[in-house]
Amino acid sequence: MPMINKKYLSEGLRIFVGLVFVASAILKYISIDIFDLYVFEHELFSISITETLTRLLVAAELTLGILLISNIHTRFAYYCVIFFLSGFTLYLFLLPYLFEVDTVNCQCFGNALVLSRGESIAKNLILLLCLVFVSPKCFTIKKWHKWFMIVSGIALFIAFMVINAPNYLYTIVHKDKIQIDVPVYESALGNSGNEAKFTDGKQIICFYSVRCKFCQRAAQKLHLILKRHQLSEDQVKVVFLSSTPDSLIALFFYNQKIPPIEYTTFRVDTFLRITSGSMPVLLFSDNGTIVQKANYVTLNEKEVVEFFRNE
């Protein structure tokens, strides 16, 4: 192959791999809450550390993609990309043997492009094959390149931490206050015929709508926290809108990979009066006394564990 053709092939494949990394980073970040829960499901880190590491990973992917496309510090980016792809491929091979997580979508491109474990492995191998024909020597070094790489990486990480902040950081900054009409809740619970079950010991009472995406994520997040710390799902009760068919409620639990939880329903107007129209709302109930409130953002792993374990 003529030298000029080799050069064009190398540049074309370098840009292609860079674009894939950029797309992967952007699509992950668009659905970062789902990616957070996917990583948290591995039970390796706390939810707070997980939310930081996912944004760091996305920033690294995007930075490497930009470096490859712009031909800046290509040698460094080239070997980092090989390390990333090799590491992710090894992880995917070992995934079913080490972790009990979903393999239908390995979150390579978030929720926008669903790739199974096998498809993700094939994608990584194709990218590694492309890199065989990429020469990391075809680039020039200028004094500002190093600073561009460092500053862009740090700037992207900070931007990702701010634009869609981790829940722990969002809670600190915004200090969400959840308004609950406790008398209306207690009255509705008494009328439901489930008061004894919903006030027995320490429980988390969850107000969910089956069609609310944040309710779905809160349900999954709470389930993963309980699973990680070996806490009983029996200590969770759910309140749905009375207009919700039982079939949709069963589907809600199934889609979040949660075992069926005991639930009751409140009339729509009563539900909205209790929660002030906000969903989801999680009430920490100690023998019927509401001692704490949370929503999807403010649901804190440490507080859940301490609530159930402290006598």
Image (tube, helix red, strand yellow):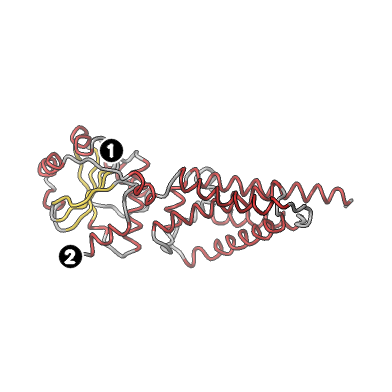
Q: Position of residue 245 (x, y in %)?
A: 27, 38
- Residue at (59%, 50%) from the top-left corner? 151
Write the residue at 78% across / 51% down.
Answer: 10
Residue at image mark 1: 278
The image position of residue 81, as x and y in percent, is 65, 57
Between 157 and 286, the residue placed more toward the observer is: 157
288 with respect to 219 (left or right): left
The x, y position of residue 56, in whole percent, is 52, 54
Q: Which numbered disc, 1 or 2, marks the residue that appears first in the sequence?
A: 1
User: At which x and y percent is residue 292?
Assistant: 21, 51
Give left or right: position of 12 versus 308. right
Foreground: 197 or 293?
A: 293
Q: Secondary structure at mark 2?
A: loop
* Quadrant in which the C terminus is drawn: bottom left
For the point 41% across and 63% down, the residue is: 43
Which residue sits at x=22%, y=40%? Answer: 179
* SS at mark 1 in the image: loop
Mark 1 surroundings within 10 Å by alpha-carbon count, few (fewer than 14), some (14 through 19), many (20 or more): some
Amino acid type indicated by mark 1: Ser
In this picture, residue 210 sits left or right of residue 36: left
Determine whether label 1 and label 2 are within 8 Å by CB: no
Check disc 2 and give the amino acid type.
Glu
Instruction: Please name the residue that numbered disc 2 is placed on.
Output: 311
Q: Residues within 10 Å of mark 2 (few under 14, many from 20)?
A: few
Comparing 265 with 80, the one in front is 80
Q: Is residue 227 left or right of residue 111?
A: left
> Could you say which quadrant of the image residue 224 lies in?
bottom left
